[in-house]
Image (cartoon, rainbow, N blue to C red):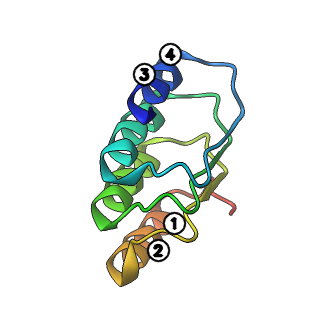
Amino acid sequence: GAKNLAAALSVNQTLKAVHLAGNKIREEGANSLADAIKVNKSLREIHLSANKIGSEGIESLSNALEINKTLELIDLSENKGGDEGAIRIAYTLKVNRNLKR
């Protein structure tokens, strides 16, 4: 699942976009993807809508986005981050100026 994909993204430097909407990634998968996002330098878009990612997963992804300077779009719509996740993403947008959407 998401762990294997994250391992591949950690070393793959050619993919520009990954569409993973509706794959039930949840917290554990989001945490694994966050580790990959920290080191991946080619990815420009990652679509993670409707994956049941809660505030812990959003926190991990936000931390990764503070490090990653190549992603321009991350879609986290229709997840379960709630107000806490939204506040965390808003803070990240202040730090990471490369994110456009």
Quote the CA–CA distance across marks 3 and 2.
27 Å
Q: Nearer the viewer, residue 7 or 95?
A: 7
Q: Report how many numbered discs are placed on residues in the image.
A: 4
* Mark 2 surroundings: few (<14), some (14-19) or many (≥20) residues within 10 A: few
Tell me the mark number nearer the camera, choosing from 4 and 2: 4
Q: Is residue 23 above or below residue 76?
A: above
Q: Which numbered disc, 1 or 3, marks the residue that appears first in the sequence?
A: 3
- Label disc, if present, on residue 11 of the rendered structure: 4
**Amino acid found under the numbered disc labelled 3:** Ala
Residue behind mark 2: 90
Q: Return the mark for residue 7.
A: 3
| Circle nearer the N terminus (3, 2) | 3
In the rendered view, tell whether residue 9 sits above or below residue 85: above
Residue extending furthest bottom?
A: 83
Give the x, y percent position of residue 77: 58, 69
Question: Can you tell which mark lies on residue 68?
Answer: none
